[in-house]
Image (cartoon, rainbow, N blue to C red):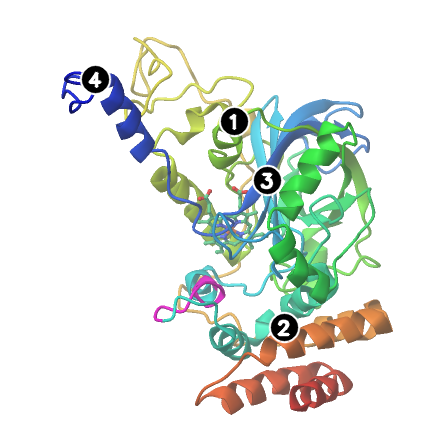
Amino acid sequence: MTAGRRGPVLLQDHYLHEKLAHFNRERIPERVVHAKGTGAFGIFKVTGDITKYTRAKLFSTVGNECRVFVRFSTVGGEKGSADTERDPRGFAVKFYTEDGNWDMVGNNTPVFFIKDAKKFPDFIHTQKRDPKTNLKSANMIWDYWSLNPESLHQVMILFSDRGTPDGYRYMNGYGSHTFSMVNSKNEKVWVKFHFKTLQGNKTLSGTRAEEMKGKDPDYSQRDLVRAIEKGDSPKWALKIQVMTDEEAKKFKWNPFDLTKIWPHKEYPLIEAGIMELNEIPANYFSDVEQAAFAPSHTVDGIGLSPDKMLQGRILAYPDAHRYRLGANYEQIPVNRPVKPVHNYQRDGMMRVDGNSGDSPNYFPNSFDNIEADKDYREPAFPIDADMADTYYRNENEDDHYSQPAALVGQVMTQKEREATIFNIVESMKGVCGPKKDEIIKRQLSHFEKMDSDFAKKVTEGLKS
Ligand code: HEM
């Protein structure tokens, strides 16, 4: 509304105010990690009987199904960054089970760089931008890895061509941590989750991935949307590894150490189900940007473990969601379980679901006759310590080398090994400045402890 055809705009034009003011508020904070991502809905179907391990209702019968929402992502880049960066890929699955939401917030790698939650912010700072130059920094990256040798296993995976998967359909997903399952007899086992791609594993070479960053920064998003829209629904088989508590006590490594795998020969994969993604959300912001996954979202029969990184994540995710989406983030449709949740939490910003009306807002009370169902109680577990202290995780768990050595020496083919060396050399060539020699020498010493031939080839590559 203007004062005449050519005159200024009137203050009373509140439609204009609404439009411009809302536009100013369109962005919400991007995720502090895993900002660039792609999401899809689908179906999970139970195909294997694992009831002897879990009483989770989802797994109660072969053939049982539930809807899922999956968000794939890269880790270090911003929301507009390129999809083919060398980076782990997030593999977050929300199972909308009849007993509430179960989130498996994993990666495409079975291990991680560190095993102590306190190190996570420092580690992520090294993967993001230098505080002064605002550039990604090979110095920060290799300085940190060389000072934290427990990262070596994940570094080997990252610099193999698995570090640049060919989109999201051709990669596996892993819960990575050790979780637990409890059966109807209240017996508990330790569990690892694996999603095996049924499309087969496909990766990009380092050179091709670099090229695609420029040619199509949204390479993985485009690939997933195109495949699903033409009816080519990608599928993954969910498998579990199971370890009893007795086995855990005798295991060669700490079974709750996120930098280690459980060898498949000793702990074979057990079939549990098939996941199929068949629907791209109608609105990206609504479902993908507002999705809130949390490892604390478990259901009866599936639980946590003493893995110290996992324990840290139990705090981090709901806290991140309250900051990014607000205290009532669980009510956003994509985050809502299929059966409504009734609790005594009330009010807060953006409480848009009726706020539980006139029902009591305290517990216990004399009006709603609600009692806690003891069947849902998690079994008590023993704690093998009577002393709290600051324990450094690498102090008496310093075998950072034998699993990566097995990976490069026995699992990788000659070609994969060469690609890994090439990719490492390309990245380490970026280390510069007064600390260059110190950082490179320290990292080479870790390669040397892992595999001297590998170390030699990286050394030669850095000289050429
Ligand atoms: C103590 C260690 C860790 C901390 C503190 C941490 C923290 C976070 C935070 C704050 C977010 C953003 C959440 C949001 O705003 O929605 C996030 C996202 C994510 N993290 Fe972690 N993280 C840790 C380790 C891990 C590990 C070990 C994995 C995989 C095994 C992982 C997988 C993911 C995934 C997949 C996402 C993206 C979820 C989505 O798609 O929305 N994180 N993490």
Asked whether 127 falls inside the magenta stretch, the response is: yes
Q: In front here: 464 or 122?
A: 464
Question: Alpha carbon of mark 1 to alpha carbon of mark 3: how far?
Answer: 14 Å
Tell me which numbered mark, 3 or 2, is placed earlier along the sequence. 3
Which mark's residue is nearer the viewer, 4 or 3?
Answer: 4
Q: Residues within 10 Å of mark 3 (few under 14, many from 20)?
A: many
Residue identified by numbered label 1: 334
Query: What kind of element bears circle 1?
Result: helix
Tell me which numbered mark, 1 or 3, is placed earlier along the sequence. 3
Q: Residues within 10 Å of mark 1 (few under 14, many from 20)?
A: many
Question: Alpha carbon of mark 4 to alpha carbon of mark 1: how far?
Answer: 46 Å
Bounds of the magenta span?
Answer: 124-132
Question: Alpha carbon of mark 3 to alpha carbon of mark 2: how far?
Answer: 28 Å
Residue identified by numbered label 3: 38
Residue identified by numbered label 4: 5
424 over 439 or under it: above or below: above
**Which disc, if any, is residue 152?**
2
Q: In front here: 281 or 253?
A: 281
Query: What kind of element bears circle 2?
Result: helix
**Which disc, if any, is residue 209?**
none
Q: Residues within 10 Å of mark 4 (few under 14, many from 20)?
A: few
Tell me which numbered mark, 4 or 3, is placed earlier along the sequence. 4
